[in-house]
Image (spheres, helix red, strand yellow):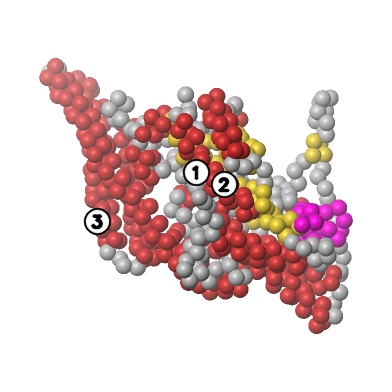
Amino acid sequence: MITTVFISYTGEALDYKAPLKKSLAAIDRAATAVARYFCPDVQRVNTNLGWEQEYFLVDEGLYAARPDLLLTGRTLMGHESSKNQQMDDHYFGAIPERVAEFMRDLEIRALELGIPCKTRHNEVAPNQFELAPIFEECNLAVDHNMLLMSLMPSVARKHGFRCLLHEKPFAGINGSGKHNNWSLTTDTGVLLHAPGKTPEDNLRFITFIVETLMGVYRHNGLLKASIMSATNAHRLGGCEAPPAIISSFLGSQLSELLERVANSTKDELFTLEGKHGVRLDIPQIPELMIDNTDRNRTSPFAFTGNRFEFRAVGSSANCSSALIALNTAVAEALTDFKERVDLLIHEKGESQLSAILDILREDIRTIAPLLFDGNGYSDAWREEAARRGLDCETSCPIIFDRYLDEASIKMFERMHVMNRHELAARNEIKWETYFKKVQIEARVLGDLCLNHIIPVATRYQSVLADNVHKIRCAFSSPERVEALTSYNINLIEQINFHTDFIAKAVDEMVEQRKQANRITSIRERAIAYHDLVAPYLEQIRYHCDELELIVEDDMWTLPKYRELLFIR
């Protein structure tokens, strides 16, 4: 049995389904009212979602030999492979035969559940893949994604794989996201975020683009909180994943159109150029149409022709979290837009066209700080985003505070999606989940260091010391002995340096964990785990990875990246 809506005895929502349905109702009301300016026959607006599910596959035997993968979903140590994704050969190569068999089996099982899987392909990182369905109504699409995420691991095991949905199971290569392609469609068949064939249609298109961006701009911190988690925090800001700053990339053509509207001084309608063709001078290939939306893989919220792509959502996430925030923010923006337009029409006597354009000009100038088409990874952008007033916080527990901002609470309550108590209760769970995930990772890493890394390293150190001793016994010449033993002595010293650091750092991490556990406030405990415990994970990892390069391969019992990342 699948519970459709889970609520408390007194009516509070206890799941994602209830607020998702409420947010869909809110955006339906708001978008329908605005759409009737342009299409009077509209009775309903549907929200569409097309998710793209990325995942890794790992051979089950290798997975079982990695306690960190088994217990946390990611590798807490592991030096990068000499060959990983530099050549893009996995991305552009054929799907491995074993994986293709898994994909076919998964798609058949999914179809039996009514999930219309359409796309399958390799992703950039080795052993990384993606599948996507035909786009569907939002509520149904979320259900299908949740069902699929429960189906994927069981099908994978039948094919000798383990399916990894963690956002960053391997360091140094791409993580896994779940791009959410989001759009609005009327019951009369009009895609509200698509340009039209007439100037009037394009005014509708501009209106919904601008007001969507208005909702995202007003609540950019909340949108970031909606996709943030202990696992997704590892992915954001590197290897094609968008940064932890919500901005929007529109492409040059749409950006220029909005600028023309903002700078216009009279009530006029605007046209939008269609796609341009390019001829390749190859007889068998006809004219190809060039995509006019451009591409920027570092943009968290990009316009892609007839929809927005919310790229910051993590692969293990429930899409509802992001969509509840996005739907509600856009519903609020559309509601405000209609109230302001109606005020100009009814109280100031302006025509509908004049009133709409006046509000659009004002809103385009307001959302300007959100628009960015450059490199989201650069330090210059982080500084610029801060100057623009965008939320640049990177601490996961503090980002969750955005749910309890007065502006967020007011928006959710005004749109009848969630109340203050529901938001506060959910944040308690978010903070608790965060610190427990870091706590588990710290415990697992500590155990691995003390029970595997240090013993294996010191055993190899003893082998080296024995070799040095035997050479000294075999040769009488000090110069000869020094020449023959200097390399191994250097390795012995390196091993000692790394193992000493690891032992001390693990002790310090355990002490910091004990201190954090004494904090009674869930929020403050989560912050303590982020600030005082989590940094040790990377520090210890560095020294473990250095030891991996030193210790003899036969002694290192943990499967290495070169084994984990290439399916045989």
Q: Is residue 204 left or right of residue 528?
A: right
Mark 2 to mark 1 CA distance (whole Å):
9 Å
**Above or below: residue 391 compared with residue 493:** below
Q: Earlier in the sequence, mark 3 or mark 2?
A: 2
Where is residue 361? Give x, y as percent. 76, 68
Q: Secondary structure at mark 2?
A: helix
Instruction: Write the residue at 23% across / 45% down.
Output: 503
**Front-lying residue, 149 or 315:** 149
**Above or below: residue 297 compared with residue 93:** below
Magenta region includes residue 190: yes
**Above or below: residue 511 compared with residue 10:** above
Instruction: Write the residue at 38% across / 40% down.
Output: 69
* Residue with the mark numbered 3: 511
Q: State which region is magenta.
A: 187-207
Residue kind at label 1, given as amino acid type = Ser
* Residue with the mark numbered 1: 150
Q: Secondary structure at mark 3?
A: helix
Residue kind at label 3, given as amino acid type = Glu
**Above or below: residue 545 compared with residue 42:** above
On residue 145, the disc is 2
